[in-house]
Image (tube, helix red, strand yellow):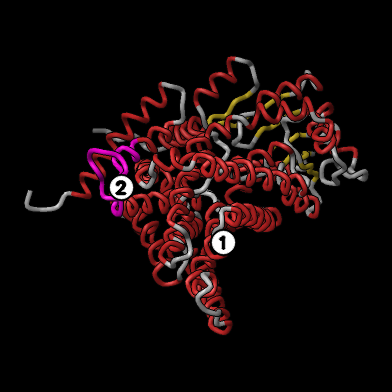
Amino acid sequence: MPHSVSLISTIAAGLGLALIFGFLAARLKLPSLVGYLFAGVLIGPFTPGFVADAAIASQLAEIGVMLLMFGVGLHFSLDDLLAVRKIAVPGAVVQMTVAIALGMGLAHWWGWNLGGALVFGLSLSVASTVVLLRALESRGVLDSANGRIAVGWLVVEDLAMVLVLVLLPPLGSWLSGKAGVDVNMLWKTLGITLLQVGGFVALMLVVGRRFFPWVLWQVQRTGSRELFTLCVVAAAVGIAYGATALFGVSFALGAFFAGMVMRESEFSHRAAEESLPLRDAFAVLFFVSVGMLFDPWVIVERPLQVLAVVAIIVVGKSLAAAALVLAFRYPLNTALTVSASLAQIGEFSFILVAMGASLGLLPPEGQSLVLAGALISIALNQLVFKSVEPLQRWILARSPLARKLEARDDPTAELPASTEERYLSRQVVLVGYGRVGRRIADALAAQHLPFVVVEQNREVVERLRTQGLMAVSGDAAEPVVLAQAHIANARMLVVATPDTLNVRQMINTARTLNPEIEIVVRTHNEAEAKLLESENAGKIFLGEEELAQSMTRHVLERSAVAPHIVP
């Protein structure tokens, strides 16, 4: 053909093979992304046959990262981010420090220089945005307390990586041992970077929160669905690119803040729905692009080194994250969920090893080892997530120390001794204080009805108590947590959290301690709703069904009072 079709051939081959091998993986009871990765390996430069354009695939993958982070921002408010800062900031810093130390120690043992060891350690310390979000979404816990902690942790890691990518070039000569470091230039670079990041965040929170929702409103008024979708995609990609070009922050971070400011619009849910098909398609291309970078021969040539890298990513990082979450007095389930979320590496790792190689810091085998660790950890991540619940049960059944940690003395895990008697008799036990739970709590408070909030986020519990509201921290699936909320005396249990994985255990505990209790459950899954109804779990509210009923009721009421039109 007289013209280049590398873009079309890359998309066609990537999506086509991803469909085939994703389907085969699903039939074999494996995560679909294993098939996507294998498709990338087949069209990569290290296997015979057709070779796709890796540069184009990488850019398509970046679009997927932007759209995914934009979608997270649409559901993640500034309040959510600030609510997890006490665990996300120190957690990310300590976990990254441990991973860097482990990576540097391993590289030093292999005889690498300081620069190569540092780049190697940094590349193992930061998790993949796409993998984490897909894992949380597939389990329906993205909007839960555990999901918000994991996403907040990820945002802190992204901010740290922005600083690393800016500071690494001026430090390159010193780290390689070729020259000294210019301290004045280093401080100047750091100062400029902090000003750029601060300027971007301030601009988005002060100007963006007003301007972009206004733009979305103006486009919506045209009544054109195409223009609305175009506005959403243009905002996600345009703001992400502008954030990188003008302020030096990553595409992912720029898109995340774009979603956060768009969340101020009343059409944010529609924006999320309109961008969902594109997000899914480009997310698949991300995994294909990762597979294209992988050289399978590294597993044959350096099996023990690859195994050591995977051990640091999957085991070392996970143990560090879990220990820190437990140290902050969060439940074992939260610790295991967060550690599983971070037990992989991705896009920032690829950028770091590429930069390290261009600066002459990383030895040739370093990039292959990091890519091998990334591909294997990504393939294992969904299996790691599936092991969270069984592992939690196994640990609690066999470890007295774990049971002691779960039942440790925590001032937010039980109601204050001064709690008024009216809160502990015929009260409503409200599980979850997110967007839905907050509205229910406000309505109960307005009617002066007693209620106790059960929430996994300790910071939220502390804030509620300063407002004079009754709240306990912990996982409501644990009997001791519902007991602390005095479920035995309650008249109603309201499960307002979107995490329905443990809802049956909550219901069983509540009915064991209080057979007459009324139960109300929220869900967004139609199959889950039908299953709960068949089990007589209580009153089940399906999000889409309730919205349809409310709209239908309004339409019928308005039609009844409106004058009939006679033809």
The residue at the point 47 percent across, 54 percent down is: 366
Residue type at the position of mark 1: Leu
The residue at the point 42 percent across, 56 percent down is: 364
Tell me the SS state at disc 2.
Answer: helix
Number of numbered discs overlaid on the protein picture: 2
Q: Nearer the viewer, mark 2 or mark 1?
A: 1
Residue 2 falls left or right of residue 74: left
Asked if the stretch drawn in magenta spans residue 53, the answer is: yes
The residue carrying mark 2 is 225
Quick check: 164 above or below 127? below
The residue at the point 86 percent across, 42 percent down is: 415
Which residue reaches farthest right?
A: 417
x and y, in percent, of residue 117 in the image:
56, 59
Q: Which residues are magenta?
A: 39-56
Residue 168 falls left or right of residue 481: left
Tell me the SS state at disc 1.
Answer: helix
Task: Please identify the quadrant where the C terminus is shown.
Answer: top left
The residue carrying mark 1 is 118
Quick check: 83 above or below 291? below
Measure the alpha-carbon separation of dots 2 and 1.
49 Å
Label 1 environment density (alpha carbons within 10 Å; few <14, some 14–19, many ≥20): many
User: Mark 2 touching mark 1, by CB under 8 A?
Assistant: no
The residue at the point 89 percent across, 45 percent down is: 416
